[in-house]
């Protein structure tokens, strides 16, 4: 009964506006974009609506602040303590905004290295987990050897996280780079950070990756990848058929699945209202420091 | 029935006779049913919830009941991260007793009732990552102390332990007394504590006795010490051997039919031609009381009454009840005196909320770096 | 027949480079190649765990290793010198390479690694002799920094000097 009511209300809600937001997907869905436009019109017509305090993009910038949506694992006190710890860590180190597809340089202290410090540059191919467990995978090809490293975002041995190029890709994770030609995951280690003008949206890189011939590590033809160019070149009819068989086109209508996989918008607002001021002051502080630094060191033109 | 009748008859017949040797009493081999230990539930095992017949109570009366509850126990309040009632005037004991005996290693202290609220990693100062479980001590109060002379445990202790240990009854999580039975609320009458949802008894030495009404907090334990945690494991229901005991099962193909997740052979023949006791077989998995021993406390938060203990294998589900004891492992017992009989809250505002063990890296500190050789 | 073969090779592409040498046609190899092209033998992804008969990649510039890799007959692990039988990073293995038995040290694995330790796209091997000194003079791929600690420890424990492997490394990750 309860579930029924929920489903019904959810359906209503979805008809009006997209109430729930996928926790981990960083890209606003087309539906959301479509819905967003009429809302703005409404706002213009009707009385001045109170502006939400928390910027809407926070759930993409700080996805790890949203807890695991599994109901059995949730506890408000634990989540609160976790958030406090995350903020404490963020006061010590700048953890910038980045997405799957961004190019990062991570400097971490390494007891095994000669200088007790190691730096790794690579493209972020995956971001997962939440809270203090949030982690990401970097991939690069160095000396024709593909290398991947898993870092935890809140690991105190990490000394610096730099975003060399801030951009998104069209897929949620880029594991297919493992089967792609090496030039698609080769990045220069001496790369200079590319600055993005303030206020511009994060660019989406829609580069199509060229895969090596089969055998592959995964059956990419089943995963509806948008960032792969030549998947049809290597698959036969039987692969195509079996890929069709495992497709679940009805899942986008499965509201319960969606409900279970996401944190409700109201809760998201609550969570970000709690951490917003702190994060905002940190952002401002960082910006000020950066300006100061850039002023002190003017670049010489050769 | 028939046998007792015959016995009675025999007794009757013999009662008149002069020779005492001929008196027939129940034979030894039939005596088993007389000396069988009977389960004596402790007196606080009584029905908790009242059958609810609210339909006869008017709205006015309901508000009246609420008012009475608030008058006697205080208004609802969020204390140390737990939803409870503000019951200041009722708690009698917050000061340490003056005539407390000193702690010795042989003494058994009281334990705590907690909830497992989740897991997350902490890092040590050497960069090592430890997985920790968070246990929140939920609004604990001593309900009663039963001295050794009066305490009658379910199982009669042996001569060595006879009258050695008393019992402390601890309650956790206040609840609305209007929902409870009269008898259950009666348990709390003498202590002045509001009726609690959960009760637990802890076997303690008489030196570690606690007066009724004493609040117990996470400060009862210190960082760096070891604790045992008792909880009821997650209920998996009836499970096969592959899930329950981690058997491999059998191949998926190569002529195997209908035996992919089965145990296979369960015993030999000949002399051992039977199923041996303890053979791993399908059955109910989980929902058992289990104690995990010797977990180090890495960090304590006194504001929310939370402790971080080593490992992610604490029995029970998230938000499940667990009981925390001093460890019984001989090498991990505390060397110097812990708060004894417990830490009395003296409301020192200067103390920090978070207490970190020496080896743990606090998130407020700078990033870890190693000294170059 | 040869047309079929050529087409197969084209399809197999880069990964089929292993087969190209068999196009030097003796009737037997042609037959084998045709048979292979259906099952795509030797083109399955390498086993992620280093256990017996796992194919490895020699990453030093030793003559033997270079020739074996160029020929497309990579060495196979025939024994792992530890108690588990599964090679982890820094473990010594015995390999069959070009009809010889040689020892080697694993310097990069495809398996899941610990946090902050690199995971490679291939299972890398450096050939050594019985004393622990490497056969080549240079490792041409990066090796993980953990090896410095692991090999130093092993040197102390086992007697043989494995640190020479570290000396010929070109780069650490």
Image (cartoon, grey):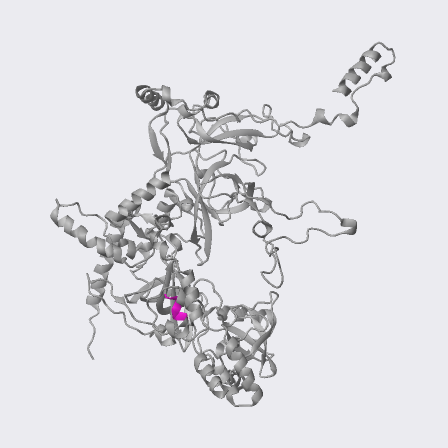
- Tally the marks: 0
Give the quarter of the figure containing the C terminus of chain B.
bottom left
Give the quarter of the figure containing the N terminus of chain B.
top right
Q: Nearer the viewer, residue B172 or A172?
A: A172
Determine the main secondary structure of the stretch shown in magenta. Answer: helix
Give how far across and how far down residue B185 sits, in percent.
45, 23
Q: Is residue B34 left or right of residue B206?
A: right
The relative height of residue A149 versus residue B12 in the rendered view (above or below) is below
Q: Residue at x 37, y 72 (%)?
A: A232
| Residue C135 visible in the snapshot | no
Give how far across and how far down residue B76 sits, in percent.
34, 30
- Whether residue C47 is in magenta: the answer is no
| Residue A239 visible in the snapshot | yes
Residue range in magenta is A174-178
The relative height of residue A110 versus residue C1 in the rendered view (above or below) is above
Give how far across and how far down residue A2 sits, in percent.
36, 38
């Amino acid at each position: 009964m309860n579930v029924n009511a929920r489903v019904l209300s959810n359906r209503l809600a979805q008809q009006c506006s997209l109430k729930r937001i996928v926790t981990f997907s960083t890209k606003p869905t087309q539906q959301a974009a479509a819905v967003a436009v009429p809302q703005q019109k409404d706002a213009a017509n009707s009385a001045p609506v109170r502006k939400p305090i928390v910027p809407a993009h926070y759930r993409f910038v700080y996805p790890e602040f949203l807890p695991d949506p599994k109901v059995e694992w949730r506890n408000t006190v634990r989540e609160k303590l976790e958030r406090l710890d995350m903020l404490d860590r963020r006061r010590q180190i700048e953890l910038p905004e980045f997405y799957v597809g961004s190019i990062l340089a991570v400097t971490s202290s390494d007891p095994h290295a000669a200088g007790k410090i190691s730096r790794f540059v690579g493209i972020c191919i995956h971001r997962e987990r939440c809270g203090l467990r949030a982690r990401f995978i970097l991939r690069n090809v160095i000396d024709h050897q593909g290398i991947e490293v898993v870092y935890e975002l809140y690991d105190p041995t990490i000394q610096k996280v730099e975003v060399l190029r801030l951009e998104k890709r069209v897929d949620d994770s880029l594991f297919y780079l493992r089967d792609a030609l090496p030039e698609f995951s080769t990045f220069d280690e001496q790369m200079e950070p590319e600055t993005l003008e303030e206020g511009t949206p994060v660019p989406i890189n829609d580069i199509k990756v060229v895969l090596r011939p089969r055998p592959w590590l995964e059956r990419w033809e089943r995963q509806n990848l948008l960032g792969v160019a030549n998947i049809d070149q290597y698959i036969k009819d039987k692969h195509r058929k079996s890929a069709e068989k495992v497709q679940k086109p009805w899942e986008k209508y499965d509201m319960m699945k969606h409900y279970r996989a996401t944190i409700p918008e109201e809760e998201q607002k609550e969570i970000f209202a709690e951490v917003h001021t702190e994060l905002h002051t940190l952002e401002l502080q960082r910006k000020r420091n950066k300006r100061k630094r850039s002023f002190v060191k003017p670049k010489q033109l050769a | 029935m028939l046998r007792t009748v015959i016995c009675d008859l025999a007794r009757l017949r013999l009662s008149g006779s002069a020779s005492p040797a001929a008196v027939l009493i129940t034979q030894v081999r039939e005596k088993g049913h007389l000396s069988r230990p009977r389960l004596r539930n402790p007196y606080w095992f009584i029905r908790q919830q009242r059958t609810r017949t609210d339909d006869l109570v008017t709205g006015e009366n309901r508000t009246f009941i609420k008012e009475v509850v608030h008058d006697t126990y205080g208004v609802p309040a969020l204390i140390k991260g737990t939803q409870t009632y503000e019951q200041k005037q009722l708690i009698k004991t917050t000061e340490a007793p003056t005539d407390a005996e000193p702690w010795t290693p042989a003494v058994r202290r009281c334990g705590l009732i907690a909830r497992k609220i989740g897991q997350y990693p902490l890092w040590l100062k050497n960069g090592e990552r430890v997985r920790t479980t968070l246990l929140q001590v939920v609004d604990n109060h001593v309900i009663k102390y039963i001295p050794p002379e009066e305490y009658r445990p379910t199982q009669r202790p042996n001569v060595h332990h006879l009258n050695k240990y008393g019992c402390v009854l601890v309650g956790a999580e206040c609840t609305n007394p209007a929902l409870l039975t009269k008898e259950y609320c009666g348990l709390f009458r003498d202590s002045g504590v509001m009726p609690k949802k959960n009760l637990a008894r802890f076997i303690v030495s008489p030196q570690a006795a606690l007066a009724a009404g004493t609040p117990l907090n996470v400060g009862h334990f210190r960082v760096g010490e070891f604790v045992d945690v008792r909880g009821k494991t997650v209920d998996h229901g009836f499970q096969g051997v592959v899930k329950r005991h981690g058997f491999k099962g059998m191949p998926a193909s190569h002529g195997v039919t209908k035996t992919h997740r089965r145990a296979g052979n369960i015993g030999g023949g000949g002399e051992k031609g039977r199923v041996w006791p303890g053979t791993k077989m399908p059955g109910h998995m989980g929902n058992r009381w289990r104690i995990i021993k010797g977990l180090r406390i890495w960090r304590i938060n006194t504001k929310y009454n939370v402790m971080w203990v080593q490992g992610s294998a604490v029995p029970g589900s998230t938000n499940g009840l667990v009981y925390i004891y001093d460890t019984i492992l001989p090498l991990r017992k505390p060397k110097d005196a812990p708060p004894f009989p417990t830490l009395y809250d003296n409301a020192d505002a200067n103390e920090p909320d978070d207490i970190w063990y020496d080896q743990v890296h606090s998130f407020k500190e700078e990033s870890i770096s190693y000294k170059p050789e | 027949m040869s047309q079929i073969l050529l087409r197969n090779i084209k399809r197999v592409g880069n990964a089929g480079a292993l087969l190209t040498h068999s196009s030097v046609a003796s009737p037997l190899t042609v037959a084998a190649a045709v048979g292979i092209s259906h099952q795509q033998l030797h083109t399955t992804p390498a086993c992620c765990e280093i256990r017996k008969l796992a194919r490895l990649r020699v990453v030093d510039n030793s003559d033997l290793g270079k020739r074996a890799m160029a020929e497309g007959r990579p060495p196979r692990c025939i024994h792992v010198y530890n108690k588990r039988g599964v090679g982890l990073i820094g473990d010594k293995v015995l390999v069959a390479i070009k009809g010889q038995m040689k020892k080697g040290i694993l310097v990069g694995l495809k398996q899941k690694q610990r946090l902050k330790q690199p995971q490679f796209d291939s299972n890398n091997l450096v050939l050594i002799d019985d004393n622990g000194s490497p056969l080549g003079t240079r490792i041409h791929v990066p090796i993980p920094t953990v090896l410095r600690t692991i090999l130093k420890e092993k040197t102390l424990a086992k007697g043989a000097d494995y640190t020479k492997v570290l000396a010929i490394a070109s780069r650490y990750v």
